Amino acid sequence: MQKNNDEPLIYGLNDRLPFIPAVCTAVQHMLASIVGIVTPPLIIGNALGLTDWLPYLISMSLFASGIGTVIQAVRFRNIGAGMICLQGTSFAFLGVIIAGGLLLKQQGADPEQILAMIFGCTLVSAIIPLIVSQFIHTFSRVLTPLVTGIVIVLIGISLIKVSISDWGGGFGAPDFAAPHNLGLGLFTLTIIVLMNCSRHPWCKLSSIIVGIVAGTLFAITLGKFHPHFTHSLLPALPIPFRFGINFSWSMFIPIALVSLISIIETVGDLTANCMLSKQPLVGPDFQKRIRGGILGDGVSCLVAAIFSSFPNTTFAQNNGVIQMTQVASRYAGIWIGGLFILLGLFPQFSQLLEQLPKPVLGGATLVMFGSVVAAGIRIMTRETLDSRSMLIIALAFGIGLGIESQPDFLKAMPQFFQTLFQNAVTSGGALAILLNLILPKTKDVNHD
């Protein structure tokens, strides 16, 4: 870490960038993160049957990401970290949003009613990071690396099912698991794996976007991709509360739990960003930056809910770009945010992304969601796993994944309880938090 910290930055945190370096930096950050920003609305939209609204949802995800990124970079009145903290929807929210949306769909809700409920609940959950930022030390004692890692692993495992479904051609597709679908997904996955094996940092950084582009071109040669555009060339203006808002405790509580978990992820991303930007990693300045970054996440989530986008958190992808380019200027964050705002105003761009072949998307997201599992395991193992830790892991995984695979296990419980805990993330995560609080910790034995 110290060696990395001694490497000089081309543009420091508060250095202003000339036009050409600013644009080049913004484009590189965009390429590294755009797939992560547009994939959540794609997956949620496809899973909940929101096809007619997908171009708008994708556009608003880009628009809200741009506004949130600018908020983090500007750091107005201590809101924001004052660094390049690109905002986007965390994959952690996908499982609970899809589960809640599917339940509403089963109850007869139409797409606009589903979206009104989702955005109403995410609007309220945006208050959580605003509150937690004022008690960050206490909060970190509750969600330890062990608990956080368990929840992240459960999130990844739940999402992998979505990837496999897309790889086969999409849920309910008439040609599901046809050879051409499996081949497209395998081709995309192979490109991503080969690029990640390269020693060149840019190959690893751009592997997802290159894999998707290559897979889409392959789909065109097979005659499986025929993009079409129904929107005019005029920009689409964002409309606050486009679908209205509604609220349900059964949907809100799982989203609130994931909001708490995402704060822990944000702290890790902000710490890495401070290191790469040559900022202190301890002391009052560091704490102020962390608090401002979490506040910025909360404000970004409020903006996202208002403009029909899913919850935003600080992304980790841009840390790799900072390390590679040695450009840490927060003014680059303003350019990045401006680029995403501009892309979000043109639905043609979003409509093209929405039409990507599902097998290609499935092959790419399998890597992303598998990486979520790997990240959770890495977080869990940051501390020594003693017998107490292994017991918590065993019970959280066993009960969480068991209930998700057999939701009828809870059929004797009240409907609210079934809705809340039929998802592995909420049942396993809540159990992990509870066990971590009540099970006695193993005493350290010192050998003098």
Image (spheres, helix red, strand yellow):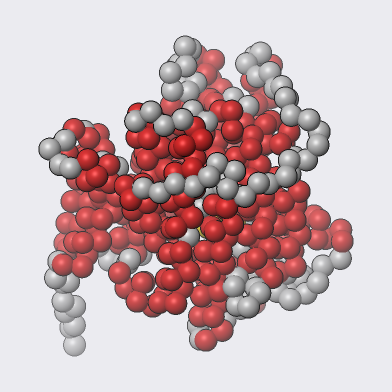
* Front residue of this view, candidates 208 and 14: 14
In the rendered image, the quadrant that contains the N terminus is bottom right
Measuring 57% from the left and 52% from the top, which residue is drawn there?
A: 306
Left-right relation of 19 to 374: right
Residue 87's spot in the image, x, y percent? Answer: 59, 57
Measuring 66% from the left and 13% from the top, which residue is drawn there?
A: 223
* Front residue of this view, candidates 235 and 15: 235
- Say above or below: 157 vs 341: above
* Front residue of this view, candidates 130 and 404: 130
Residue 189's spot in the image, x, y percent? Answer: 54, 32
Residue 157's spot in the image, x, y percent? Answer: 36, 41
* Front residue of this view, candidates 359 and 134: 134
**Is residue 412 visible in the rendered structure shown here?**
yes
Q: Quarter of the image holding residue 106? A: top left
Residue 2's spot in the image, x, y percent? Answer: 56, 76
Q: Quarter of the image holding residue 292? A: bottom right
- Say above or below: 223 vs 123: above
Measuring 66% from the left and 58% from the top, which residue is drawn there?
A: 67
In the rendered image, the quadrant that contains the C terminus is bottom left
Left-right relation of 93 to 410: right
- Say above or below: 444 vs 205: below
Q: Residue furthest right?
A: 19
**Is residue 90 visible in the rendered structure shown here?**
no
Q: How many marks?
A: 0
